[in-house]
Image (spheres, grey):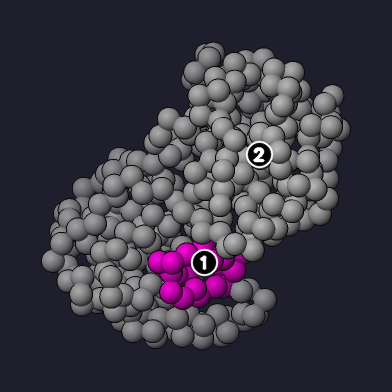
Amino acid sequence: MNTASPQKQEPDALQGGAPGLLAPDSVRRILVCQLRQLGDVLLTTPAIELLARHFPKASLHVFTEKKCLPMLENNPHVHKLWPVDKKKLPTLLHEFAFYRKVAAQDFDLLVDFQQLPRCRAVAAFSRARVKLSFPPRWYLRPLYTHWLQPAPAYAAAYKAGILEALGIRWQGERPRLYLRPEERETAQRVLASLGLSQGPFISMDVTHRRATRRWPARHYAALMDMLAREEPELRFFLPFGPGEEKEVRALRELCAAKDRMAVLPSLLSLREVAACMERACLHLGNCSAPRHMAVALEVPTFTILGGSGPGWTFPAPEHRTLQAREVMDMPCQPCNKNTCSTGMPCLEKMTPDVVLPYVLEHLQTFGRRRQVA
């Protein structure tokens, strides 16, 4: 997420809102370009909702990666998905043929949230009347007709900020994940088999591919044991994604109260995991996609921050973050870096006994037994 200060716009760039740029009833097709990652795609759903409301007659299409489809499936505002499946695009010739096919859908409006090479290719082929994005580098300007630099804000609000060029403003819309009845039914069965259907439980996100965003496993294990002692009825749900099962099971082995730590017996789909998370009283973990999924499902969250800044946190009291600089001297945080040469003190020194009272306070204030239809 770009959190730089708004830059002075070039003369041919928009200087603010332009409600007359496209008459709402004149737009028949819209393409939104957001290829990755899972959390970023989910954070695009408020902008998608805003576009759908502003252009009620438009068919809204999304150009994304295949792995991100679960974040958009069943979304009532999305009419067609154009997934990039790398296995089906083995050569550049296949890729460009696909990009031309996407661009040939006669879009009136194209909104590019990333300017990645694949997004730029679609923009280059598209004849949309308006091609809107963040301020591009000088050599990319011919690909777009309009651009706008939003002010720093929560990630989803920042994305939606470029829509002010169309007279559209973010009004606090949260990300949305629209689950199907059958996914919720699967979640009910899974949770019952894990003994999580009767009492309150916290969903835990204990993995992250970046070490600077991952609180140590031993800290998570100790914190869960402390919470288990403080809240005798509380249990913990530890889901995992592809390639994460070994890491999650190893963390469970570090816990003294193993009988309170429920690990999935096998890999579920991402949306089935989300349906399980929906019934949690609280989601606790690292700064990654599951926290955005919890926000989208209206589950209170508590996130332990390492290198990440506060811009990924939905601005509401039920979504709490804790970073080392709040409780100790840590001037380097947030660094927004993927590596650390000093041993990641912002995570290592945030010991479970430091975190515990903040989690308990948040749990008591916002945690609850979820009632999901």
Residues 292 and 129: in front is: 292
Crowding near the residue tagged with mark 2, few <14, some 14–19, many ≥20 C-alpha atoms within 10 Å = many
Disc 1 residue crowd, few under 14, some 14–19, many 20+, Cα 10 Å: some
Vertical arrangement, residue 254 with respect to residue 131, above or below: above
Residue 31 in percent (x, y) is at: 38, 72
As drawn, 111 above or below 296: below
| Residue in the picture at 54% in, 35% down | 301
- Residue 97 seen in render: yes
Label 1: which secondary element: loop
Disc 1 to disc 2, C-alpha distance: 23 Å
- Of 276 and 124, nearer the camera is 276
Name the amino acid type tagged 1: Asn
**Residue 346 spot, x, y in % from top left:** 59, 24
Residue at 33%, 66% (x, y): give it: 52
Image quarter of residue 153: top left
Q: Position of residue 198 (x, y in %)?
A: 71, 38
Magenta region, residue range: 62-84
Q: Earlier in the sequence, mark 1 or mark 2?
A: 1
Kindly indicate the quadrant of the structure image that contains residue 342.
Answer: top right
Q: Which mark is residue 74?
A: 1
Q: Is residue 201 magenta?
A: no
State left or right for residue 253 relative to residue 339. right
Give the farthest residue toward the left: 20
Residue 203 is tagged as: 2
- For image coordinates 54% across by 66% down, the residue present is 73
